[in-house]
Image (cartoon, helix red, strand yellow):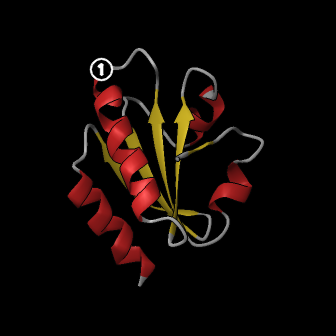
Amino acid sequence: MAVAVTKDNFNATVAEGVSLLDFWAPWCGPCKMQLPIVEELSSELAGQATIAKVNVDEEPELASQFGVMSIPTLILFKNGQPVDKLVGLQSKDSLKAKIQNHLA
């Protein structure tokens, strides 16, 4: 299951290794389509990468910090630094490939 990220646990979540954060909101249609993909990746990549989600309604500071203007926005972090940003609905295969590129 994808980890729910808040400003309180953000640094600990992305500090080490590869992390994918899905910036979403419950009222967003494309976000509802993205969520099952994010959850599947969370299961498939358990122990290799951290898959997490940020509710932009509850964490506007985090959304603003990373320039999230539209959702879903997925940001890939490696050792605490953002390395890739994807805006809009993403396929499971493309997300998995991007994550695996940074695992090597």
Label 1 element class: helix
The residue at the far bottom in this view is 104
Residue occupied by mark 1:
29
Image spot of residue 55 (x, y percent): 55, 29
Farthest right residue in view: 8
Indicate the position of residue 3 as horizontal and vertical percent values.
Answer: 59, 46
Few, some or many C-alpha atoms within 10 Å of disc 1 (few <14, some 14-19, many ≥20)?
few
Examine the rendered structure and indicate whether residue 78 appears above or below residue 65.
Answer: below
Residue at the spot 30% in from the left edge and 20% down from the top edge? 29
Vertical placement of residue 44 versus 62, above or below: below
Instruction: Indicate the quadrant where residue 17 lies.
Output: bottom right
55 to the left or right of 11? left
Q: Give the side of residue 12 with respect to residue 44, left or right.
A: right
- The residue shown at (41%, 30%) is 69
Residue in front for this viewpoint, 78 or 69:
78
Left or right, residue 45 beside residue 6: left
Callout 1 amino acid: Gly
